[in-house]
Image (tube, rainbow, N blue to C red):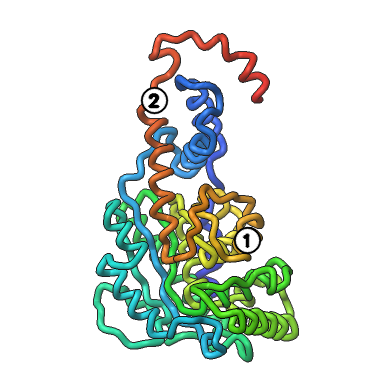
Amino acid sequence: MNFELELKEKIKDIDSVDSEKMREASEYIDSLIKPPKSLGKLEKIAISLAGITGKVKNTLKKKRIIVLCADNGVTCEGVSSAPVSVTASQAVNMTKGITGMSSMAKHFGVETEIVDVGIATDYNCEEVLNKRIRKGTGNIAIEPALTREEVIRAILVGMESADRAALDYVDILGVGEMGIGNTTTSAAVLAAISGALPGDLVGRGGGLTDEAFQKKISVVERAVKRFLNSSSDNGDIIDILSELGGLDIAAMCGVFLGAAKNRIPVVIDGYISVVAALCASRLNEKVSGYLFPSHESKEKGYKIAISLLDLKPWFNLDMGLGEGSGCVVAFQIMEAACAFVCNMGTFKSGGICDDYLEEIRKQEK
C-alpha cells in the first residue's frame, strides 16, 4: 500500500472556509442589540464557526477530545523527570476519568477518545484504542525517531480519528496527547520549522532540575544539528517528523488535517498540540481556518509556534498539563459565542432604532 499517495489524496480534499458565510455572520452579529464589536473575541469565534459549518447560528452539543499517546526514545537521555511507564498508566487513567483533562471532560459532558499510537509499556485496557505503529521511537539525539512510512501511517491514524468523529456527528474536536519526553521532541520539531535556537524553545516540561534542564537543551541542539546535516530538504514536514518528532505529534497533526477535511472546528491545546497544528498547516495551509487556540502554555516555545499560526491564545491560567486540558475550558468559551448568536435579539426585534450607531459602524469599517 502506498501510504504517502493516500495521504496526499486526503489532504487535497481540504477546502477553504466559507468567506461569504463569514461575511453573513458578521452582518448578523452587527444587527444584534449591543454596541458594535462589544463582544470582542466571542464575535470572531462565532464568525469563524460560520465559515466552517456554513451556518450563522451554531451549537456545540457533541464535543470530543482525541488524545494521542506514544513514547519517545529520547527519554533515555534523561530529559524527563517521569518514567516511561507513566504514559501507559495515564492513558488507562484517562479512560477512567481520573486524570486532569478527563476529570474535567467528564464533568462537562465532553467525550474522550484515547488512542495508542506508540506506547512502549504493556498495559491491559480495552478502552484505549489500539492503533500502535511501534513501541516508542528512536532516540532523536543519535538517530531518526521514525521512518517516513511510520510518520505517514501515524498521520493517517489521526485523520481516521477525525473521520470517526464526523460519522458520530461530533460538533467540535480538541487535540491532546500523553507521551513522556514529548516536550523535547516538540522543541526539536519547532526548531527545525522555525529556525529558532533550541535554547529559546526548550522548557522544563513536567519539571526538571537545573542540571537536567541544561541537558535537555543540549539534547535538542544535538538532534537538530544531526537533522540539518542529514536532510536534503529541511522544509519537508514529513522528513522533520521522521527525524525529530514522535508518533503522538504525527498523529495529532493528522487529527488537525482530518478535522479540516471533515469541516469540524478543532481546538489546539498546549505546546505539543500547537506544534502538531503548525505541522498540519504546513502540509495544507487551508487547515489554519479550522484552528482555535485555547490557553497560553507555560512552555517557552509556545509563543513562537502560535505566532507562526497567526493566532493568539484566549486565556492564561498558568496551565502546563497537556492531555487536552485547555480544550475543555476553551469549549465553554466557544459555547458562549454560540449562545449569544442563537439567543440574542436584534435591534429590530427589540424595538430599538439603531441609527445612532451609523457613525460608529462607519468608523469601525
Residue 338 lies, with reference to residue 171, above or below; the image says: above
Which residue is labeled 1 in the image? 305
Question: What x and y, as percent, mark residue 365?
Answer: 66, 25
Please tell me in which quadrant of the rendered image residue 112 appears.
bottom left
**Depth order, front residue of 90/116:** 90
Mark 2 belongs to which amino acid?
Answer: Met
Q: How many marks?
A: 2
Distance, label 2 to label 1, CA atoms, is: 36 Å
At 44% across and 78% down in the image, what residue appears? 70
Regarding residue 260, the answer to whether it shows in the image is no
* Residue at position x 52%, y 86% in the image: 75
Q: Amino acid at mark 1?
A: Ala
Labelled disc at residue 344: 2
Q: Secondary structure at mark 1?
A: helix
In the image: residue 213, left or right of residue 127: right
**Res 36 seen here:** yes
Mark 2 neighbour class, 10 Å CA radius: few under 14, some 14 to 19, many 20 or more: some
Up/down of 342 relative to 259, above or below: above
